[in-house]
């Protein structure tokens, strides 16, 4: 059971957003901008980065849903598991590996970020805008993991909700009429 009694036993992120609807709407709009707005990174690449960040954080809910969204958008099945195990041996485009290393370090050791971390991304051919967009995805994913885990959102049987949530996010995006 989630930690807050006002959240249903089968908590979804919308339940959390309903505690503060205005903030929930802002967070949904932020997701839409960061994950679906214009970017040198494709929507699939941004979902991959977000899912990877959630996996590094060991958040079953965020990882499970965003992994499915990434797959629905064309990321190869099994790719995220391979990335979590070892970026260097994962069957992902070499150009993405510096961005994913950046995501891992920013997630696990943010105070140790140095110019060389960004330079590795630039040396792989990414622009400053691409790195900025990736940082937004990484930060947003870390934020959401803490929101979900703070509310007890990985307790109980959450996996049955992954497919419906992933379908909604893939087909509708992060802001929909009537959604928080």
Image: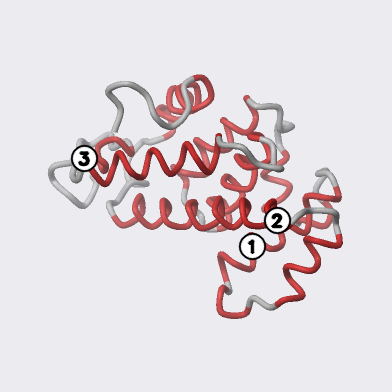
At 56% from the left and 64% from the top, the residue drawn is 107
Name the residue rendered at 78%, 50% in the picture. Answer: 96
Towards the viewer: 111 or 33: 33
Side (left or right) of 75 relative to 47: right
Mark sitting earlier along the chain (1/3): 3
Question: Which quarter of the rendered picture does the N terminus lie within?
Answer: top left
Q: Nearer the viewer, residue 82 or 119?
A: 119
Image location (x, y in percent) of residue 99: 72, 56
Q: Nearer the viewer, mark 1 or mark 3?
A: 3
* Residue that label 3 marks: 21
What secondary structure is found at the residue carrying circle 3? Answer: helix
Q: Assess disc 1: are there few (<14), some (14-19) or many (≥20) residues with their C-alpha within 10 Å of its C-alpha.
A: many
Say whether disc 3 or disc 2 marks the residue closer to the N-terminus: 3
**Taking 89 as reference, is 161 above or below it?**
above
Q: Residues within 10 Å of mark 3 (few under 14, many from 20)?
A: some
- Tally the marks: 3
Which of the 4 quarters of the picture holds residue 161? Answer: top left
Identified at 53% across, 25% down, the residue is 170
For mark 2, give the secondary structure: helix
Q: Which mark is residue 168?
A: none
The residue that mark 1 highlights is 104
Image side of residue 56 versus residue 23, left or right: right
Badge 2, how many Cα within 10 Å: few under 14, some, many 20+? many
Pointer 2: what residue?
A: 100
């Amino acid at each position: 059971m989630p930690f807050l009694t006002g959240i249903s036993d089968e908590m979804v992120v919308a339940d959390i957003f309903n505690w503060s609807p205005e903030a929930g709407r802002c967070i949904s709009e932020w997701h839409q901008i960061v994950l679906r707005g214009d970017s040198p990174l494709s929507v699939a690449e941004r979902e991959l980065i977000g899912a990877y960040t959630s996996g590094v954080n060991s958040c079953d809910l965020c990882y499970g849903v965003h992994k499915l969204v990434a797959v629905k958008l064309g990321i190869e099945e099994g790719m995220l598991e391979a990335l979590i195990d070892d970026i260097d041996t994962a069957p992902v485009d070499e150009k993405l590996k510096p961005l994913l290393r950046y995501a891992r370090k920013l997630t696990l050791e943010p105070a140790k970020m140095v110019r060389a971390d960004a330079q590795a991304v630039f040396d792989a051919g990414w622009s400053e805008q691409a790195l900025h967009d990736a940082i937004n995805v990484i930060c947003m994913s870390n934020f959401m993991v803490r929101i979900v885990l703070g509310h007890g959102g990985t307790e109980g049987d959450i996996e049955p909700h992954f497919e419906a949530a992933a379908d909604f996010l893939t087909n509708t995006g992060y802001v929909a009429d009537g959604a928080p």
